[in-house]
Amino acid sequence: MKLADFRGKWVLLEFWGPNCLPCLQRSLPALTKFYEEHANQRDQYEILAVCVVTEEDGPKTMEQLDSVMAPIVEKTWAGKPLPFPVVLDGEGKTFEAYNILSVPCSVLIDPHGHVVKDGDETMMAEQLKK
């Protein structure tokens, strides 16, 4: 998956970790709600959940991540998996490329591929209203 694949859309990169309670309990559920509430505008935006794994023994494949996330999906998210694409950053390359210091962290990219300073889903929602 390349960011260029989404050119022409607003893209929200949500950096998160499988051991990050604020990510699992607040930011990802909030983005799931956003995704559902703005379903009629899906042609204008995308959310990509970038799972950052920094632990040596953390999941290195999507299958391993699915296994780790299964109890969270069942118990924390009432059996509903994330409705948007999940990308695994097992080496931290994307995390470093965007100079992310901690998770959760949102990076908003405009339809032309430029990072929007201090952008988040609230700002994206405002842009979608226009």
Image: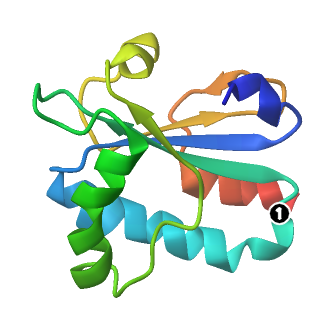
Which quarter of the image is occupied by the C terminus? bottom right
Element class at badge 1: helix
* Labels in figure, total: 1
Image coordinates of residue 120 in percent, x first then y, are 53, 47
Task: Give the residue at x 29% y 47%.
Answer: 64
Q: Which residue is mark 1?
A: 129
- Along the line of sight, the residue nearer the viewer: 44 or 68: 68
Query: How many residues crowd mark 1 within 10 Å: few (<14), some (14–19), many (20+)?
Result: few
Task: Give the residue at x 84% y 74%.
Answer: 40
Q: Quadrant of residue 7?
A: top right
Tell me how the rendering is colored: rainbow
Image coordinates of residue 6 in percent, x first then y, are 79, 35
Image coordinates of residue 31 in percent, x first then y, are 50, 64
Which quarter of the image is occupied by the N terminus? top right
Image coordinates of residue 93 in percent, x first then y, are 40, 14
Up/down of 118 relative to 35, above or below: above
Up/down of 105 relative to 81, above or below: above
Up/down of 71 relative to 15, above or below: below
Task: Give the residue at x 59% y 59%.
Answer: 84
- Along the line of sight, the residue nearer the viewer: 13 or 124: 13
Lateral position of residue 97 relative to residue 76, left or right: right
Lateral position of residue 56 relative to residue 47, left or right: left
Q: Amino acid at mark 1?
A: Lys
Up/down of 11 relative to 121, above or below: above
Task: Give the residue at x 50% y 34%.
Answer: 118
Lateral position of residue 67 relative to residue 93, left or right: left
Q: Quadrant of residue 78?
A: bottom left
Q: Quadrant of residue 30?
A: bottom left
**Which residue is farthest front?**
63
